[in-house]
Amino acid sequence: MKRVDERDIMFARMGLQPGGVEYLDYYKRHPKREAIDGELRDMPHLCAQNTPTYDPMLVPAVEANFELLAHLRQFCNGEVNAIKTQVDTQEISSLIKNMTAHYGAVDVGIARTDEEFYYSHRGRHTQNYGDAVDTSSKYAIVFAVEMSVDAVNTAPAMSACLETSKAYVDAAVIGLQIAQFIRGLGYDARCHMDGNYLMPAIPIAVEAGLGERGRNSLLISRANGCFVRLGIVTTELALQTDAKANLNIERFCRLCALCVKTCPARTISESGDSATWRIEQEKCYKTWRSLGTDCGICISACPIGQEIDAENIKDMTEEQIIAFVDGYKAKFGSRKRNRNKGFV
Ligand code: SF4
Ligand code: SF4
């Protein structure tokens, strides 16, 4: 697996200041991206008043959540207790998983974090832009927090964006609690939260057994389909790892393709070849900036987690999947949309 450079993700690119050192360095290395990134930078911002989804009540609520997250980032790392508590690997792994679930996660797993899972370089914040990522922690506790299906199904309205931001806060709080707990035991631990991940969340969630990647490039979690956000705590504490999930999502996605037709950017692959299932981040992000929210239509379009459980898919025959998808379309059309755009 090739390591991802965080400087390549859209949020990092949108943060570059034209004419600045980082800007000049980035587009010298990626000249083909300069024109499209300039076009995107000139579009209205997410939550801006001149976007079609602007809501004078919900935008401040979304912004409140992201501001809180910005304040919380300083607690991702912390002092490690000089007194190390000796622990049994199996016992501590099970305690951490139970605690994470008790604090509000709908699912939790543990994975080895070899170097390939980490970003190669940081890209979101000027104070560490371009720094090589520290890959020394070898274990990750990966967990999912639930998003309300009713709220997500209002997508692309601001109420869906509010649900996303709320789930990021939920994940951050749980991650901070767990990281602080592990540091208290005398082992280094770091919480990864919105705007401060040191690794892309989906590959490590797959590795930890939380689910499989779907055609829409999102994690289809065994707990709640795409209706989740992910949190991660990495640590030097040796833990017992989990097996990958075995959900057979790829076969279901090949026969479903509901998200393909609903994506306004037309960037979800129609092909039956899962090797081509990648979204073009520029096209997706352009839709976000046109709408003023994080879109979310491809989450809402997915029947897994709302009309069928991920755990039930593996044993379905192809005929049963086709019948299910046909029935779903007959009942809900292209997606099960919630037209209530207020607070859900
Ligand atoms: S977020 Fe919207 S634009 Fe992006 S892939 Fe999903 S449906 Fe398409
Ligand atoms: S909508 Fe269908 S094809 Fe798209 S991710 Fe969900 S299950 Fe897969």
Image (tube, rainbow, N blue to C red):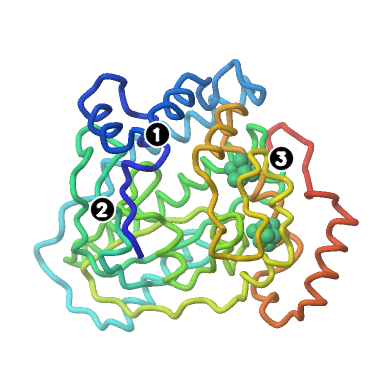
- Number of marks in picture: 3
Among all residues in the image, which is located at the extreme left? 82
Among all residues in the image, which is located at the extreme top? 50
According to the image, label 2 marks what residue? Answer: 120
Q: Position of residue 126 (x, y in %)?
A: 24, 32
Q: Position of residue 280 (x, y in %)?
A: 52, 45
Residue under the image location 33 percent in, 82 percent down? 91
- In the drawing, does residue 237 fall left or right of residue 241? left
N-term-proximal mark, 2 vs 3: 2
Q: Nearer the viewer, mark 3 or mark 1?
A: 1
N-term-proximal mark, 3 vs 1: 1
Query: Which numbered marker is on residue 154?
Result: 3
Q: Secondary structure at mark 3?
A: loop
Residue under the image location 36 percent in, 65 percent down? 1
Front-most of 139 and 23? 23
Quadrant of the picture in which ligand 2 is shown: bottom right
Is ligand 1 closer than 8 angstroms to the Cβ of mark 1? no
Report the amino acid beneath label 2.
Ser
According to the image, label 1 marks what residue? Answer: 33
Report the amino acid beneath label 3.
Thr
Query: Which numbered marker is on residue 281?
Result: none
Q: CA distance from mark 1 to mark 2?
A: 20 Å
